[in-house]
């Protein structure tokens, strides 16, 4: 059995979960479920990033301790994931003692190897991003990532010799062209690496930031939050083994948003190289969800609360929209009208309608049991070829997370089924007294049910609950239909969304 280990970023606990957190986690969950479907021992880890200046500041504003603050906010994430039907393997918190020890042990190793040194440093510091920026990186004098104000700081700190690994990292990326996905993100990282790489400041003095993992060789400093956070991908699974006894690390996929590409494709791999660990097999950077062409933002009032859609329309259709609408790597627009059109067209009209037709005709003409096919011909072979193509396409493309294209192929098989039903007109065959028509009806309904069974199986990683209901409606087991399967209760899995126009 092949193995699969994927990670989400660990989410910062200075705010509640939003659409970006939901998408990344749903994407990772779906990708992991697809690997399980195709026979992998698959596992993914998620969690929360709980140290740093923003947490310390937020806790102080609320008049509570940082630990109280992170205990409360971590639960917002832990409570949301079951509501989105996220089947993660482990939830890590960076305040866990074993993680803190792992970070300190690795820093001590780097220090003992001469990979870390101290010096006085001056630079523009962003509290929002918790990092220093060169003056040339600032945009209108502000932090180029968040657009917030920066302040000039001069202080002693510890630095990791990141620049030492610049050429080695460039060589690795060139030798492994799909290490960073999609390819234009790889080009973005290589473009950044054309400029001389600075060493990485990996500490913060306790005099201005006490909430962090203490540096093991100097108690007056704590660890830079990104160095602390990145090591969770190994610390959380270091004692775990796959069923065949092999270790979880290296991860098959780090799944991240494009805004943290630098930390995962420059900071993290150079630390790994210095430690002598194996690099993750892939880093997949997805795009942003936009509203009216701009990134969603709580401060501008353009955020989308995932639970508003889940509570109104159901978790599975929300998951379907996220996976179907965004081409992984590109930005996508979250528009309510698009959501309604997508659900009504793909799920209510195509999948739901096809399933209801097959179920009703089988119920009324074959006593609620899937008929065995009498004689399959070219029409049936052509229809089943769509299902075979969708299955093969899914197996070949989940490795690069081309999930929107996978869904499109699955829906093509469902659309082909509905065209087949229009041509064969089983409702007319059902009215005939001719034996040949009854035989044809049996073949049509069996073939249609088998195409639906395959589509339902292939869509189950995206819509686990609805597809289980669909499977039960067909009386299907794990393998191909044989005839004689007893239908389950019929129900409209995807009622059309009807909304009044103003």
Image (cartoon, rainbow, N blue to C red):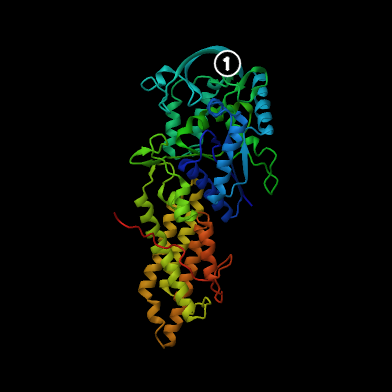
Residue 278 in view, yes or no: no
Residue at the image position 38 percent from the left and 35 percent from the top: 300
Residue at the image position 53 percent from the left and 64 percent from the top: 469
Q: Which of 306 and 109 is in front in this view?
A: 306
Residue that sits furthest to the front in the current view: 63
Residue 272 appears in which quarter of the rendering? top right
Q: Position of residue 268 (x, y in %)?
A: 55, 30
Residue at the image position 44 percent from the left and 59 percent from the top: 410
Q: Position of residue 139 (x, y in %)?
A: 37, 23
Q: How crowded is mark 1: few (under 14 residues within 10 Å), some or many (20 or more)?
A: some
Describe residue 41's horizontal placement relative to residue 292 as left or right: right
Q: Nearer the viewer, residue 74 or 277?
A: 74
Q: Which of 68 and 5 is in front in this view?
A: 68
Residue 134 in view, yes or no: yes
Q: Position of residue 33 (x, y in %)?
A: 56, 52
Q: Where is residue 132 in the image (x, y as percent from the top left)?
A: 49, 20
Residue 218 appears in which quarter of the rendering? top right
Residue at the image position 40 percent from the left and 49 percent from the top: 325
Residue that sits furthest to the bottom in the current view: 433
Q: Which of 25 and 193 is in front in this view?
A: 25
Residue located beneath label 1 in the image: 157
Q: Is residue 31 above or below residue 366?
A: above
């Amino acid at each position: 059995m092949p193995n699969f280990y994927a990670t989400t970023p660990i989410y910062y606990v200075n705010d509640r979960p939003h659409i970006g957190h939901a998408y990344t986690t749903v994407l990772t969950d779906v990708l992991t479920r697809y690997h399980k479907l195709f026979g992998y021992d698959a596992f993914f880890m998620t969690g929360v990033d709980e140290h740093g200046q923003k947490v310390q500041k937020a806790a102080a504003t609320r008049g509570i301790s940082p630990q109280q603050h992170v205990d409360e906010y971590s639960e917002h994430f832990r409570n949301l994931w079951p509501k989105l039907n996220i089947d993660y393997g482990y939830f890590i918190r960076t305040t866990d003692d074993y993680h803190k020890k792992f970070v300190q042990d690795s820093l001590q190793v780097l220090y003992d190897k001469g990979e870390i040194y101290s010096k006085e440093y001056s630079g523009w510091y962003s509290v929002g991003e918790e990092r220093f920026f060169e003056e040339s990186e600032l945009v209108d004098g502000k932090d180029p990532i968040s657009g917030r104000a920066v302040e000039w700081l001069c202080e002693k700190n510890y630095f990791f010799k990141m620049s030492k690994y610049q050429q080695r990292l460039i060589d690795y990326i060139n030798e492994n062209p799909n290490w960073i996905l999609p390819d234009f993100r790889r080009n973005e990282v290589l473009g950044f690496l054309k400029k001389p790489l600075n060493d990485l400041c990996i500490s913060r003095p306790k005099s201005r930031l006490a909430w962090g993992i203490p540096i093991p060789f100097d108690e007056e400093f704590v660890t830079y939050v990104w160095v602390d956070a990145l090591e969770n991908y190994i610390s959380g699974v270091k004692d775990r083994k796959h069923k065949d006894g092999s270790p979880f690390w290296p991860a098959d996929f780090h799944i991240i948003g494009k805004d943290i590409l630098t930390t995962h494709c420059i900071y993290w791999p150079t630390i790994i190289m210095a430690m002598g660990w194996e690099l993750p097999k892939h880093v997949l950077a997805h795009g942003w969800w936009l509203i009216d062409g701009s990134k969603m933002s709580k401060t501008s009032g353009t955020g989308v609360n995932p639970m508003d859609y889940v509570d109104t329309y159901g978790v599975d259709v929300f998951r379907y929209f996220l996976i179907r609408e965004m081409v992984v790597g590109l930005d996508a627009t979250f528009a309510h009208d698009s959501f309604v059109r997508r659900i009504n067209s793909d799920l209510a009209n195509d999948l739901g309608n096809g399933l209801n037709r097959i179920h009703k005709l089988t119920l009324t003409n074959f006593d609620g049991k899937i008929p065995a096919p009498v004689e399959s011909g070219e029409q049936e072979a052509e229809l089943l070829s769509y299902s075979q193509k969708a299955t093969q396409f899914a197996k070949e493309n989940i490795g690069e997370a081309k999930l929107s294209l996978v869904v499109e192929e699955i829906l093509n098989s469902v659309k082909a089924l509905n065209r087949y039903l229009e041509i064969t007109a089983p409702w007319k065959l059902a009215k005939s007294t001719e034996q040949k028509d009854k035989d044809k009806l049996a073949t049509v309904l069996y073939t249609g049910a088998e195409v639906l069974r395959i589509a339902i199986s292939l869509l189950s990683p995206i819509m686990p609950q609805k597809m289980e209901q669909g499977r039960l409606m067909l009386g299907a087991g794990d393998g191909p239909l044989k005839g004689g399967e007893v239908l389950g209760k019929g129900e409209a899995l995807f009622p059309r969304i009807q909304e009044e126009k103003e």
